[in-house]
Image: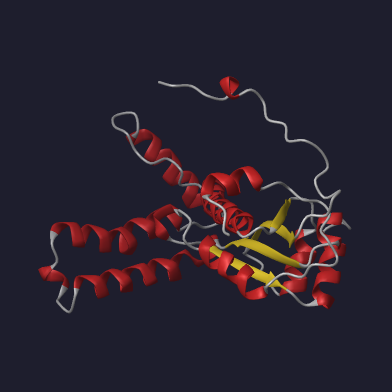
Amino acid sequence: MEKTVSEAIHYRRSVRVFRDDIDLDTEMVKECIQNATLAPTSSNLQLWEFYHITSPDILKEMTEACLGQNAAKTAKQLVVVVSRKDLYKQRAKENIEFLRSVYGDKPESEYSRREKFAVNYYKKLIPTIYTDFLGIFGQLKYLAFNLIGIFKPIYRQVRRSDLRIVAQKSAGLAAQTFMLSMAAKGYDTCPMEGSDTLRVKKILGIPRKAEINMVIGCGVRAENGVYGPRFRVPFEDTYTQV
């Protein structure tokens, strides 16, 4: 029986050692990846990709690229979450095409004010924010937006480094959604920061401009798979009601 959201959250742990005698249902893992694509994402740009690794040969190569970690070495499958800030033009175009299909077969001159705003958001605003050249445009936009911000609230994350963070946040939300989906089905995962991302890209043929968000080991936890009891700092130290 599938776990509730709360049950899945409490069940999920970073499992370092997976059982060797239990295989994963590949289609079920794929279903969890599909759930991940429903995660929140900035401007609905969905600047992510997922590499689902089931090949024993590729798993072996990935174990080396993940620095020999047990979470990779014993994993039955791996999922690599990739941030694709470089795809913003394509994703914006796809959003525009979707909006036009929703609005129906009519010229843009007949769009409502709200419909025009939504289309122009992707046609004009997204390119304005994401377009850059060697970081120069980003710095100029940053200065201009902060100058405007003296007089009124304004979006300020317009530098290349800011937009990298935006794309990585969306990819991270998708990764967490995937891991909770896996937990709901009784499967286990381990998100790994420690990897040679250049080697990971080479193994999987990932484009140069793409960025690895995380590598996630997948399996069913062994008895020694969780290294210790869960520790969290006191909730009161992290919570503020305003």
Q: Is residue 206 visible?
A: no
Q: Residue at x 44, y 53 (%)?
A: 42
Residue located at (26% from left, 75% from top)? 101
Residue drawn at the location 38% of the way across and 72% of the way down: 94
239 left or right of 117 in image: right
Q: How is the image coloured?
A: secondary structure
In the image shown, does 223 or 154 lie closer to the viewer? 223
| 106 lies above or below 16 | below
Q: Residue 109 lies in what quarter of the image? A: bottom left
Measuring from the top left, give residue 18's x and y in whole percent. Answer: 81, 58
Can residue 186 be seen in the rendering of this structure?
yes
Q: Work out which residue is located at the far front of the displayed protein and give it.
A: 1
Question: Is 79 left or right of 149, judged from the image as shown?
Answer: right
Q: Quadrant where the N terminus lies?
A: bottom right
Q: Is residue 189 above or below residue 34?
A: above
Number of labels in the image equals: 0
Q: Nearest the camera: 106 or 230?
A: 230
Residue 120 picture location, percent across and down? 27, 61
101 to the left or right of 74: left
Where in the figure is residue 197, as x and y percent of width and height? 75, 60
72 versus 160 height, above or below? below
For residue 58, what is the image quadrant? bottom right
Q: Nearer the viewer, residue 196 or 233?
A: 233
User: Residue 164 placed where, x, y %?
Assistant: 56, 51
